[in-house]
């Protein structure tokens, strides 16, 4: 399967690298699509591979967003004054400061959510099934509401991310810069997970999904693996959040940062559409979902939410296994699962 | 040879129900011991208590001299005390070989072994063990697609893959085609003699357990009714009454 | 009844759903008197949160309480090696 995949990867890589020049008007859209792919891939680590449906993975996305913007501003200017009123007009970043801020900001946007996941993991991941879902939902919503009350980061009004410094290119360069950062993040997430799923880690997560009690009875410290999975997801989600915050430019706690009702739920739908528990499922699901969503916003303006709702219902009713799941049922051979009829019918013999 | 497992005055209550009342028994290392009793006598509960699935209310359980009643399940399993389940538990969406691979003990258990690639030798070992239980031809099938009896065999193979010191088997021949039962008995004897694994077996099939075990404990209504060699137990009036109901 | 007092929007039901879930979790499924008590307790908690922490933290405190209660239950049950079903 991997040998004839190489040209396929090459095409995606080429598309990804060339897209800003092929579709200059859609740079932001394709950047967001890569971010959605990261959201889907990281959700799948809990939802599809471990069987823990998380409604609050967006929690780490939001933390990353605030951390990144906070560092970008806080390294050079007093944060409280920035958020108080139109800070971006009073405090101007010099180009060197801007890029230093982004660099440090993105790194911490990955590390801090990862540390948060490590801290709360032991408590939250001890819950199972729907209780885990509700607890994570509560986390996401609580974080959004609480962030909406903290004056330092802008309270309900939100805060603006530092604008692109004047004097280095214009909007073009800015979009291209963030586009490539999003693309690199997506590729890094994909490659890391592709490697991780082939190791013991991937197999243990699947075992936890299939029968957690059995895994524990066989001597596997399931909590360690679950927490590690959450740390991995949190890391990539945090960086994605940092990038998204910069691209949108305006960080509002409940709608943009801790967007439980939009991106938080979209994560789940994208993975369901593409196929839970597979590596490519979330990617395909995210891309198709994004294309549909953008199509609805363009062509069905006024009814776009209705169309999105119909799409969601269709996904849940007709694609419970997702696209990759359905393909795997129809063509198991192409997935490396060779099932011989004789094997199924064979009787067990003990001589 | 010492006692590998010591159960001492164990009590387990579920609300008002006395599932295990004052159970004391010991298993000799390297032996095959049977646990019989009518349904509802507390056999599986006792297994659960030994392995740590639930805490016990009173008493102590020692494995190789170490107190295990306070330890969580994965720690007990890593000490070498494994159990199979009455209602089979296997990893349904993975195929049989993967089920085996994940059951193997990793050499070290740290962050690096977490992300280590699964060694090639394990695949050969799992295929050998699958062959041992007769599932070689079905090794590529999804474990969830196997029949109940085949899943029981897979569970046995998975337990062997983990190289335990002692194995608690919960009704290993239930649901197995009767023509295969002799094969199972042979294999259990082989496991015990060649791999040196102590077996503690819950069984309802009297023929199997009388042929297999060197010592048998009988439970009834949560209490230890009788213990002794198969011949003694077979003729013990209390055991016969418990199974058939006192006349 | 909510529709009469407040403005309607699609997400108006969410906080109420979460609050009812929280109350049932604290009381335990099927425990009717417990549910009534917890409901009143939660109402008191929310008013105090509103007063002490400020109105902007009211909903946040409620959802945070949900998380804390679930985690507390998880640790209490894990002593008995059971799980919330």
Image: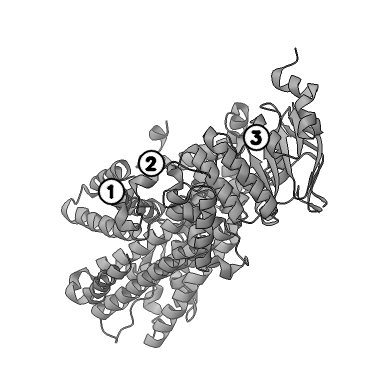
- The kind of secondary structure element at disc 1 is helix
User: Can the viewer see residue A128 in this picture?
Assistant: no
Q: Are marks 3 and 1 on the same chain?
A: no
For label 1, the crowd category at 10 Å Cα-Cα, with few meaning under 14, some 14 to 19 and many 20 or more, is few
Q: Which chain is home to disc 1?
A: A
Relative depth, front residue between A95 and A107: A107
Q: Position of residue A284 (x, y in %)?
A: 29, 59
Check the image and name the residue furthest to the top.
Answer: B247
Relative depth, front residue between A289 and A284: A284
Which one is in front in this view, the residue at disc 1 or the one at disc 2? Answer: 2
Q: Which mark is residue B208?
A: 3
Q: Residue at x 50, y 67 (%)?
A: B120
Q: Which mark is residue A330?
A: 1
Color scheme of the displayed model: one colour
Drawn side of residue A134 relative to residue A305, left or right: right
Disc 2 and disc 3: Cα gap in Å? Answer: 28 Å
Drawn side of residue B226 relative to residue C57, left or right: right
Which one is in front in this view, the residue at disc 3 or the one at disc 1? Answer: 3
Q: Which chain is home to disc 3?
A: B
Q: Position of residue B3 (x, y in %)?
A: 81, 49
Disc 1 and disc 2: Cα gap in Å? Answer: 20 Å
């Amino acid at each position: 399967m991997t040998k004839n995949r190489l040209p396929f990867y090459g095409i995606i890589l080429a598309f990804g690298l060339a897209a800003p020049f092929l579709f200059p008007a859609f740079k932001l859209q394709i950047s967001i699509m890569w971010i959605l792919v990261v959201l889907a891939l990281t959700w799948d680590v809990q939802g599809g591979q471990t069987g823990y449906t998380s409604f609050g993975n967006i929690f780490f996305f939001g933390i990353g967003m605030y951390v990144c913007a906070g560092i970008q501003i806080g390294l050079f200017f007093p944060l409280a004054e920035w958020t108080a009123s139109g800070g971006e007009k009073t405090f101007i970043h010099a180009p060197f400061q801007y890029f230093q801020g982004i660099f440090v900001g993105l790194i911490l946007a990955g590390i801090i959510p990862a540390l948060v996941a490590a801290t709360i993991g032991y408590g939250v991941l001890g819950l199972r099934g729907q209780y885990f879902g509700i607890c994570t939902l509560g986390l996401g919503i609580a974080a959004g509401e609480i962030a909406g009350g903290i004056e330092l980061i802008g309270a309900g009004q939100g805060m603006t991310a530092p604008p692109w410094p004047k004097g280095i290119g214009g909007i073009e360069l800015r979009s291209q810069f963030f586009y490539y950062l999003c693309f690199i993040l997506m590729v890094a997430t994909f490659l890391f997970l592709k490697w991780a799923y082939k190791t013991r880690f991937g197999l243990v997560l699947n075992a936890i999904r299939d029968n957690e009690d059995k895994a524990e009875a066989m001597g596997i410290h399931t909590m360690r693996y679950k927490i590690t999975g959450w740390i991995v997801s949190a890391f990539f989600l945090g960086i994605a959040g940092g990038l998204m915050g910069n691209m949108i430019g305006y960080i509002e706690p409940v709608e943009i940062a801790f967007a439980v009702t939009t991106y938080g739920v979209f994560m789940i739908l994208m993975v369901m559409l593409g196929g839970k528990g597979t590596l490519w499922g979330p990617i395909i699901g995210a891309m198709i979902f994004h294309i549909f969503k953008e199509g609805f916003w363009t062509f069905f303006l006024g009814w776009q939410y209705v169309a999105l709702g119909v799409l969601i219902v269709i996904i849940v009713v007709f694609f419970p296994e997702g696209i990759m799941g359905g393909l795997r049922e129809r063509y198991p051979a192409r997935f490396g699962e060779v099932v011989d009829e004789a094997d199924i019918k064979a009787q067990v013999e003990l001589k | 040879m010492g006692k590998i497992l010591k159960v001492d005055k164990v009590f387990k209550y579920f609300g008002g129900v006395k599932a295990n009342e004052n159970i004391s028994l010991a298993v000799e290392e390297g032996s095959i011991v049977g646990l019989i009793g009518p349904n509802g006598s507390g056999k599986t509960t006792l297994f659960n208590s030994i392995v740590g699935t639930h805490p016990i209310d009173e008493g102590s359980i020692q494995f190789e001299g170490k107190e295990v009643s306070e330890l969580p399940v994965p720690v007990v399993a890593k000490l070498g005390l494994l159990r199979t389940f009455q209602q089979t538990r296997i990893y349904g969406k993975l195929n049989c070989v993967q089920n085996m691979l994940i059951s193997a003990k990793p050499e070290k258990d740290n962050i690096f072994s977490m992300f280590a690639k699964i060694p090639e030798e394990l695949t050969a070992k799992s295929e050998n063990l699958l062959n041992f239980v007769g599932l070689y031809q079905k090794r590529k099938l999804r474990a969830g697609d196997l029949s109940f009896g085949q899943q029981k065999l897979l569970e046995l193979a998975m337990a062997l893959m983990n190289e335990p010191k002692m194995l608690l088997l919960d009704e290993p021949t239930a649901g197995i085609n009767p023509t295969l039962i002799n094969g199972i008995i042979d294999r259990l004897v082989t496991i015990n003699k060649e791999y040196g694994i102590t077996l503690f077996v819950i069984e309802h099939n009297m023929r199997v357990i009388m042929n297999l075990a060197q010592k048998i404990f009988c439970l009834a209504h949560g209490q230890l009714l009788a213990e002794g060699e198969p011949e003694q137990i077979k003729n013990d009036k209390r055991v016969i009454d418990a199974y058939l109901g006192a006349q | 009844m909510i529709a009469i007092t407040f403005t309607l929007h699609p997400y108006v039901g969410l906080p109420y759903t979460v609050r009812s879930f929280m109350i049932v979790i604290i009381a335990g499924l099927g425990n009717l008197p417990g549910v009534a008590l917890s409901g009143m307790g939660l109402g008191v908690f929310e008013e105090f949160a509103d007063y002490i922490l400020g109105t902007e933290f009211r909903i946040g405190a409620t959802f945070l309480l949900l998380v804390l209660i679930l985690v507390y239950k998880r640790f209490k049950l894990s002593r008995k090696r059971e799980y919330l079903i």
